[in-house]
Amino acid sequence: MRDALADLTSSALHYYVAGFEDRADEEYRHLTLIEHKVQLMLNPRESDHKRFEELSRQMISALMSGKKGDQDFADAHPAVMDLSRQILKREWDRVKDKIELPI
């Protein structure tokens, strides 16, 4: 999950910084593929997971809308990063608490 989130956010940022004119359909396809992989790992019953889906969709939609999506991307990307950290931390704590350490 961590690798997929890193790929999603770093690819989105790269595409944003690279400029709108130089992007190919293949780049968008790759970004959408990663987005869907991450979505399949999320729990649709958890509110922060649902919020993550909304934010990641906003981030990618902003990229696809060109220059007019600049502010939407600037808002969504850090929010996706922050929420990713929160979800990963909580899931790590869940797993860690279930591991029985030998005495």
Image (cartoon, grey):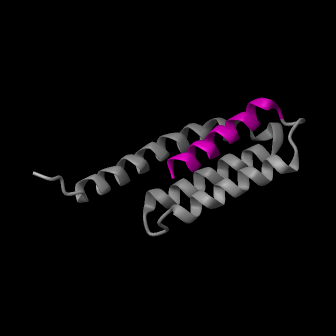
> Where does the magenta region start and end?
1-19
Image coordinates for residue 67, horizontal then vertical, percent? 81, 36
Residue at horizontal 58%, vertical 61%? 39
Residue 55, position as x, y percentages in the image: 59, 51
Residue 7 against residue 54 in the figure, above or below: above
Residue 13: say if magenta. yes
Left/right of residue 87 with respect to residue 4 in the rendered view: left
Q: Residue at x 18, y 52 (%)?
A: 101
Residue appearing at x 30%, y 51% in the figure: 93
Along the line of sight, the residue nearer the viewer: 87 or 61: 87
Is 100 left, or right, of 43 in this rendering? Answer: left
The answer to whether residue 50 is magenta is no
Q: Position of residue 76 (x, y in %)?
A: 61, 42
Which quadrant of the structure image shows residue 63?
A: top right
User: Which residue is drawn at the image coordinates 42% and 49% (left, top)?
Assistant: 88
Instruction: Name above or below for residue 18 compared with residue 6.
Output: above
Residue 68: where, in percent of width, then height?
A: 80, 39
Q: Main secondary structure of the magenta part?
A: helix
